Image: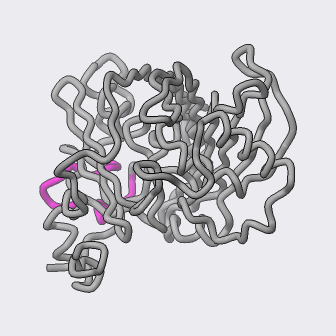
Amino acid sequence: MSRLAPLSEEPINEDQDAAYCSKKAQTWPNWIKNHFSLLSKKKSNLKILLSFLGCPLFPVSVHPKQPITEVSSSAQYIIEHFRAGDRLPETGGEGKEHMVPNKWLIELVVSGHKIVAGSDGKVAWRQTPWLGIHTTKGSVRPLRRALQGLDPVAVSAVFSLAQYTGEKRILGVDCFVLKLSVDQTDLAERSDNTIEMIKHVMFSYFSHRSGLLVFLEDSYLTRIQSPGASPTYWEITTGTKIEDYRTVEGVMIAHTGQSRTIITRFGGNLKAGLAIRRMEETWMIDDLAFNVRGLSTECFIPPEEVQENYPEEVFDWRSPLHQ
């Protein structure tokens, strides 16, 4: 069996071939063609919502490459304030320390439409009824959703290496602002001969008073050009309000939030000019627990289709972690 082609997280030109998709699955270009313009159909709207808001990945990995010594003193102060507000122990405590930070799994079902995404720490994948199962490009990164106040340890690890850009009042809250930009190497890993990731930037807003993360803003720009066609550009911006922090086993966890995404397409031969799509998601957590009994690393084993197309050593479950 041939190796699964990685699936870009970004939209693909409508006239690009179906190389990214399995024979049984509908291609991403065809899905865009058939559904993106059908604004009146609720099922199509749900597919778009699940694709762009359901389980996108964070711009950078939990373990950034830069040494901690390169962090500005201002950013260090903000993160220490966050750790104190979130009651995170300095060395990680029982139930709070990340033993396998790159292993995660999420399932979302809305009105009969289901999307699944997961990572075993080495390979990340996504599965939808309209695209089938595909691996994702670039390094393994956490879910953006996990950093929306749900995973304080990851928030601390990632944003401790961010750049301090000043202060801003947002949603009535005075905040410190930290900026994370994806470097050119990572952008290149997520690009190919037709899709170029131009930028991916995220801003985090930490409350002056509580130190907690109250807002995330994520923006990325993609250039798409198939052979013989004019280039088109997709800019996708998502802002997430994070609130209702409650203590769960000594850790402050956000229990409600709201995300708004604007998808803008321009360039190429678009007769109508800019194509803009807006989406909104409101979420609430009913229950949350750490150290769930019966949950093991085997829960994060990739689907058979993914395992069959990667070297055996990638899926060696005999490592010390599993003994």
Q: Residue at x 45, y 39 (%)?
A: 145
* In magenta segment, residue 291: no
Q: Residue at x 48, y 61 (%)?
A: 226
Q: Nearer the viewer, residue 148 or 262?
A: 148
* In magenta segment, residue 22: yes
Q: Quadrant of residue 296?
A: bottom left
| Residue 283 at least partly seen | yes
Q: Nearer the viewer, residue 91 or 270?
A: 91
Q: Is residue 275 left or right of residue 307?
A: right
Name the chief secondary structure element in magenta.
Answer: loop
**Residue 61 vertical position relative to residue 25 in the rendered view, above or below:** below
Q: Residue at x 58, y 24 (%)?
A: 241
- Residue 81 point in image, percent of width and height: 73, 39
Quadrant of the image containing the N terminus: bottom left
| Residue 231 at least partly seen | no
Q: Nearer the viewer, residue 254 or 270?
A: 254
**Residue 200 vertical position relative to residue 256 in the rendered view, above or below:** below
- Residue 291 point in image, percent of width and height: 31, 47
Q: Residue at x 27, y 35 (%)?
A: 108
Q: Which residues are magenta?
A: 15-30
